[in-house]
Structure formats: C-alpha cells, structure tokens
Image: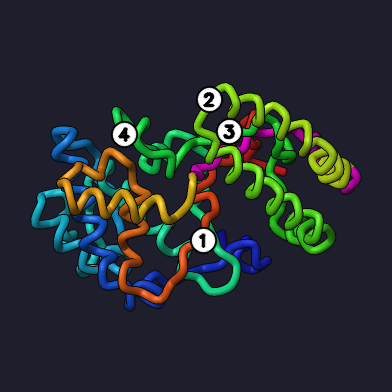
Amino acid sequence: MRELVKEQLVTQLVPGMYLYNLRNFATSFIQHLDKVYRRHPFQYRIPWVKVHMEKLREVGDMLVERDLARENPDDSGVWYEVEPRTANLFMAYLAAVLGQLVSGDRYYPITENERLLNPFIPHGTFKKEANVARKVILEGVLPSPTSAIQPGRLAEFKAKYGRELKAFRREIEKQVSEIATIENEDARIYRLDHTKGDLQEMVEEISSRMTEEKKWPTVTFGDFCAIAGSAVSGYKAILDKDLAFGLVAAGFGLAPAVFNAFKGSSVTLEDKPLAYAAIARRQFATKS
C-alpha cells in the first residue's frame, strides 16, 4: 500500500475532512441499519472486526447503544470492535458517500468480490418497484495481467496511456448507466450483448498495449460489474414515498441512505454508477 501511495496510484483520505458538513451522515446510516435488522432478525457473527473511530465518528456510539459495537480498552479508545455484517454495511456506505464528496473527479467504491455489492441492490418485492439500483455485468471487458505488477510499472503504464484509459472508463460508465435504465429484461440482455461488441476495439487496444510492455505477464480478461440505475432523482422519490407512507426503504438497498446523507448539503450528486466490482478470471500470483 505504501508503494501504491508513493506512485500516486492510491489517494489517502481522512474521512473527517469531508464528513464534517454532512449533518445526516450518522442518522441516515443508523435509520437504514435499524430498518435492515427489523426486516431480517439479527444474529451475531464472529469474529468482530476493528473500525477506527475517525471513520465511525458519532455512528460508533449509536452502534454501541444497539450492541453492534464495543470500545476496545486495549487500543486507547481509538478503535471500535464492530459486528462484521454491520461493519461491511457501514464501510460500503462510507465509501459511497466519500466518493461523492471528493472535489474534482468523483470516486466510487470498488471491490474484487461481487457479493459485497449486494447492499446497494433492491431486494424482494422492491425489485419491481424501483430501478434506481441494478447490477450490470459486462463479461470479459477488463484486460489485466495474470500476475501482480510492481506499482512503479503500473504508474508508468498509466502515465503513458492515461488518455486511452480515461476514455475507456468514461465509455464503460456511459454504457452501464444507459443499460441500467432499461426495464425490459430481454431488451437489457440484448443491449449487453451488443455493448460488449462495441467495446471490443477499445479492449483490444488496451490489451495490446499491455502485451507490448516488457516483462509483463500474459494478459487475461476479467468481468466488470457495476451498480447503476435510472437517476439520483429516483432516490429522492423513494425517500419521499417512505416518509409519506411509512414504507420500509431498506428494501431498496443502501443507495437511498447514501442519497439521504446529502440532504441539506451543497453537494450535487451525479447520475453515475454507484459502485464497481472488478472480477478477475484468475487469482493474481503473490510475486511478479
């Protein structure tokens, strides 16, 4: 991680520097959490995981009140031990909120585990009532080396082909956002098939640049999975309906809670994918 930071491939963020003006940050998450556990009776999971108090802020005390967290006296009060399901949900929420707060280009949560995107997706009967958050999978569109690459070499590749990489990302975001708004499943599958073909030229261009690099291992193609939807305005409609009729908004997933965190702030949310998963076809080797 230190090498990634050194090569400016990872930007370190201090959450408190960005969350201080979001009055609804804590209450929005806790309200969502309470609704989730009302729908699905809670069962403790072990082992509990450590989350730094600087990330949790006032959420930490609220979790302690619900027996979902406890302070660790051995860590001088800077860490909470948090029930793992709750910790995963909070970190997804925190990452999505921070992604919208950082100035300039927006950032998004990304994981190598597609399952960890599930908190953002509507479930049960709510799948039919809202298309604000839908999982879209593009298979075989992410060229990547089959083993680990030193951060310095990755940085060189990014600097050399930055324009092509940014164009590729923008095009994938555009296609995914459009596909997610198609309500008819057959039409959506048809568009997915054609989109992969439309992206093929860009995929081949980037993969050929990778194979040209000296000492790079073989290139393989992973899957790209995104959580995208109709529009940010759809989250507002859900929250308004929830307040008016007492619906259990937790059924719509974590996305409305992220939207609700920004109510009353000056931040303008963007209609772009909410979270990503980059799914490798093979396990990366531990050495390069």
The quarter of the picture where residue 221 lies is: top right
Vertically, is 53 above or below 241?
below
Q: Which mark is residue 137?
A: 3
For numbered disc 4, what is the local secondary structure?
helix
Vertically, is 267 above or below 192?
below
Report whether residue 147 is seen: yes
Q: How far apart in space, not on screen, are marks 4 and 1 (Cα)?
A: 23 Å
Q: Residue 216: where, in percent of width, then height?
A: 82, 43
Residue 26 forms part of the magenta stretch = no
- Residue displayed at 37% across by 49% down: 255
Q: Earlier in the sequence, mark 4 or mark 1?
A: 4
Q: Which mark is residue 185?
A: 2
Q: Earlier in the sequence, mark 2 or mark 1?
A: 2
Mark 4 against mark 3, which lies toward the viewer? 4
55 vs 80, nearest the viewer: 55
For numbered disc 3, what is the local secondary structure?
strand
Q: How far apart in space, not on screen, are marks 4 and 2 (Cα)?
A: 16 Å
Q: Earlier in the sequence, mark 3 or mark 2?
A: 3
> Which amino acid, mark 3?
Ile
- Residue displayed at 65% across by 30% down: 192
Q: Earlier in the sequence, mark 4 or mark 3?
A: 4
Looking at the image, do the residues carrying marks 2 and 1 touch, with CB atoms under 8 Å apart? no
Q: Which residue is mark 4?
A: 126
Left or right placement of residue 155 versus residue 60 in this view: right
Q: How far apart in space, not on screen, are marks 2 and 1 (Cα)?
A: 25 Å
Looking at the image, do the residues carrying marks 3 and 2 touch, with CB atoms under 8 Å apart? no
Q: Which residues are magenta?
A: 212-229
Q: Which residue is mark 1?
A: 270
- Residue displayed at 80% across by 56% down: 157
